[in-house]
Amino acid sequence: MKKEEETFAIRTYDKAELASLYCPGREPGAALQNLYRWIRRIPRLTEELNATGYNKYRHCYLKQEVEIIVKYLGEP
């Protein structure tokens, strides 16, 4: 039996959910801190997120923000 690979869907994600996809096996809080760190280390990524109206207090990444993150970090 052949196992189908799941493709990554570009959609709105809860921040902890997306972080857990990038850092499987880590606690959600630790995964989230990792993702924040990776985003901050790429100035162009941070600039593009800010240009879309990114709100660091929102509990989710919008579809457009996920597209930008994947553009710089690749698919999880």
Image (tube, rainbow, N blue to C red):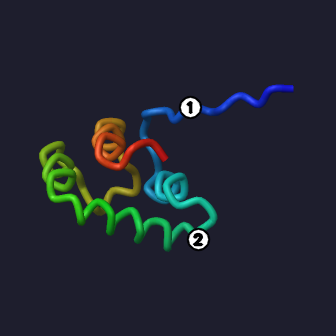
Give the CA separation, mark 1 to mark 2: 23 Å
Place of residue 47 in the rendered image (x, y in percent of width and height, measured from the top left):
13, 52
For the residues bearing labels 1 and 2, Cβ distance under 8 angstroms: no
As shown in the figure, which amino acid type bears the numbered disc 2?
A: Glu
As shown in the figure, which amino acid type bears the numbered disc 1?
A: Thr
Query: Count of labels shown?
Result: 2
Place of residue 12 in the rendered image (x, y in percent of width and height, measured from the top left):
42, 40
Q: Quadrant of residue 70?
A: top left
* Residue at the outermost front position: 2
Q: Which mark is first along the chain, 2 or 1?
A: 1
What residue is at 24 percent from the left and 65 percent from the top? 40
Closer to the eye: label 1 or 2: 1
The residue carrying pointer 1 sits among few (fewer than 14), some (14 to 19) or many (20 or more) residues within 10 Å by Cα, namely: few
What residue is at 49 percent from the left and 67 percent from the top? 31
- Residue that carries the numbered disc 2 in the rendered image: 27
The residue carrying pointer 2 sits among few (fewer than 14), some (14 to 19) or many (20 or more) residues within 10 Å by Cα, namely: few
Place of residue 9 in the rendered image (x, y in percent of width and height, measured from the top left):
49, 33
Q: Quadrant of residue 5?
A: top right
Q: Is residue 27 left or right of residue 35?
A: right
Quadrant including the N terminus? top right
Nearest to the observer: residue 69 or residue 73? 73
What residue is at 58 percent from the left and 71 percent from the top? 27
Give the numbered dot on residue 17.
none
In the image, residue 40 sits, relative to residue 8, either above or below, namely below
* Residue at the outermost right position: 1
In the image, residue 7 sits, relative to residue 52, either above or below, namely above
Q: Secondary structure at mark 2?
A: loop
- Residue that carries the numbered disc 1 in the rendered image: 7
Place of residue 53 in the rendered image (x, y in percent of width and height, measured from the top left):
17, 47
Q: Secondary structure at mark 1?
A: loop
